[in-house]
């Protein structure tokens, strides 16, 4: 769904996956990406942060998350 630009379906899928396997960092990363795509920046930050504390993420994914968190924090600072 994510690759086919079906954001609502992908968001719902990742929400389900994180409830079924809450310790899987890949699901939290996917949820964060989908939340960011739907402009839920606060939710994305929470999901990305949670993903960093979970298992199953490559160092490349961890670096991606850290960069996204910097971008989201900068956007948040711009809103203030």
Image (spheres, grey):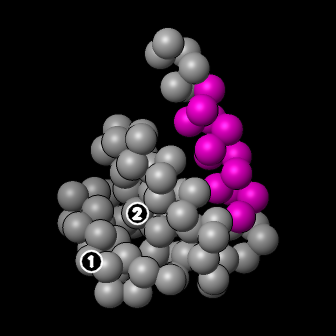
Q: Quadrant of the N terminus?
A: bottom left
**Left or right of 28 in this view: 14:** left
Looking at the image, which residue is at 27% across and 77% down? 16
**Which of disc 2 and disc 1 is earlier in sequence?**
1
Can you give x and y, in whole percent of width and height, for residue 62 in the image? 71, 64
What is the tally of numbered marks visible in this picture? Answer: 2
At mark 1, the secondary structure is: helix
Asked if residue 22 is positioned above or below residue 1 in the image, the reply reads below
Indicate yes or no whether the magenta region holds residue 70. yes
The reply to whether residue 39 is visible in this rendering is yes
Quadrant of the image occupied by residue 56: bottom right
Mark 1 vs mark 2, CA separation in Å = 10 Å
Image position, residue 11 (x, y; %): 29, 62
Q: Secondary structure at mark 2?
A: helix
**Residue at point 64% right, 66% down?**
52
Left or right: where 51 falls relative to 42: right
Q: Main secondary structure of the magenta part?
A: helix
| Residue at which label 1 appears | 16
Taking the spot 56% from the left edge, 67% from the top edge, the residue there is 51
Report x, y in % for residue 69.
62, 44
Neighbor class of circle 1 (other Cα within 10 Å; few <14, some 14-19, many 20+) is: some
Density class for disc 2 (Cα within 10 Å; few <14, some 14-19, many ≥20) is many
Q: Which mark is residue 28?
A: none
Residue 63 falls within the magenta-colored stretch: yes
At which x and y percent is residue 28?
47, 68
Camera-nearest residue between 9 and 53: 53
- What residue sits 42% from the left and 80% below the top? 22
Please state the extent of the stretch shown in magenta in the rendering: 62-74
Query: What number is the disc on residue 31?
Result: 2
> Residue 1: in sight, yes or no?
no
Say above or below: 56 vs 67: below
| 7 sits to left or right of 27 | left
């Amino acid at each position: 769904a994510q690759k086919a630009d079906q954001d609502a379906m992908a968001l719902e899928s990742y929400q389900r996956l994180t409830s079924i396997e809450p310790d899987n960092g890949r699901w939290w990363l996917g949820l964060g990406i989908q939340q960011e795509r739907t402009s839920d920046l606060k939710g994305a930050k929470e999901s990305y942060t949670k993903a960093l504390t979970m298992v199953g993420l490559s160092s490349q994914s961890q670096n991606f998350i850290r960069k996204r968190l910097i971008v989201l924090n900068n956007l948040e600072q711009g809103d203030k």
